[in-house]
Image (cartoon, rainbow, N blue to C red):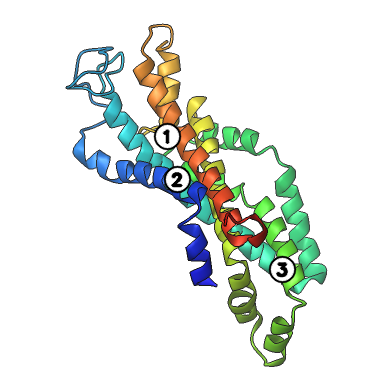
Amino acid sequence: MRREALYFAVRNRKLVGGLAVVVVFLLAGLVGPLLVGDPLAYVGPPAAAPSGEYPLGTTTFGQDVLAQLLHGLRATFLVGTVAALIAGVIGMLVGFTGGYRGGLVDEVLNMITNIVLVLPVLAVLMIIAAYLQVRDVLVQAVIIGLFSWPWVARAIRAQTFSLRAREFVDLARLSGMPVRRIVFREIAPNMASYLFMVFILLFGGSVLFAATLDFIGLGPTDGISLGLMLNHAKQWSAMNLGMWWWFVPPGLAITAIVGAMYVMNVGLDEVFNPKLRET
C-alpha cells in the first residue's frame, strides 16, 4: 500500500507542485535569516525602491524589506507548525478517547468540544493577545493551537466510531491489548493519511489566524512576521506612497504558502482516494 501511494504521489501534479512551493519558502525561511542582518535595523536610505543593493527595497525607516521577509517566513512556519501540532494532539486525544470509549466519557468530551467550537475564535484570540504584555511567536502559536482543535476532535471521533467495530479491533480487544495500544496501534494507523491531511489544514488555518492577528496589531512585540509587515505598511501609508515592495511580497508569500498547502491537500486526497486518482 505504501508503494502504491508513493507511486501515485510522485505522479500527482497538485501534490508535487504544492510541495515544491512550500519547500522553497521553507528553505528561504530557514536559511535566509542566516544570510541577512537584523530585520529591524536601519541600514539604508528611507523608502528606497528595489535595487541591486536592496532587492526588495527599504521601508520608510530604511529597514531592509528582504531581511524582514525572510525572518517573517521563519515566524510563519514556526507558528503554523507549533499551532498545528498542539491542535492536532488535543484533537486526537479527545477524538480517539470519545470515539472509542463512548458512553458518559464521550458525552462529556463532546460537550467540551461543542463549547469550544461555538466560541468566536478570532474574537477570543484578539482579547487574549490584547491583554498580553509581551507577545512572541511561540505564545501566539500556543494560543492559536489551543482554540483550533474542536473540528479535528469531531472528525476523528466519527472515524473512530466506525473503526472500533471492525474485526481487527475486536481481535485486539479479545487478546487483552490495552486500550491505549488498540487506539494507537490498530485504529490510528488506519487513519494515518487522514491525520496527515488534517495537519495540513491546521497549518494553513493557523498561518491565516496569525496573519490576521498581526495585521490588526496584535502580533509579536519582539520580532517580525509577514502579518506585521503588512500592518506596518498600512500604518505608514505604503500603498498611498506607491511603495508596493513593502506590502506585496509578504502578501504574496502568505497567499502562496497557504494556497500551496491546500493544493497539496487536494493532491493527497486524490492519492489516497482510488476514485479520484489520476491514472
Q: In this view, does 165 lie to the left or right of 82?
A: right
Q: In this view, does 272 lie to the left or right of 156?
A: left
Q: In the depicted view, which residue is nearer to us: 171 or 234?
A: 171
Residue 107 sits in quarter: bottom right
Q: Mark 2 points at which residue?
A: 17
Q: Tell me residue 67's x, y (percent).
A: 27, 31
State the CA–CA distance, disc 3 to disc 2. 32 Å
As drawn, the label of residue 145 is none
Crowding near the residue tagged with mark 1, few <14, some 14–19, many ≥20 C-alpha atoms within 10 Å:
many
Q: Which residue lies furthest to the left in this view?
A: 53
Crowding near the residue tagged with mark 2, few <14, some 14–19, many ≥20 C-alpha atoms within 10 Å:
some
Q: In the depicted view, which residue is nearer to us: 66 or 236?
A: 66
Q: Name the N-terminal-most of marks 3 and 1.
A: 3
Q: Mark 3 points at which residue?
A: 160
Element carrying mark 2: helix
Q: In the depicted view, which residue is nearer to us: 274 or 254?
A: 274
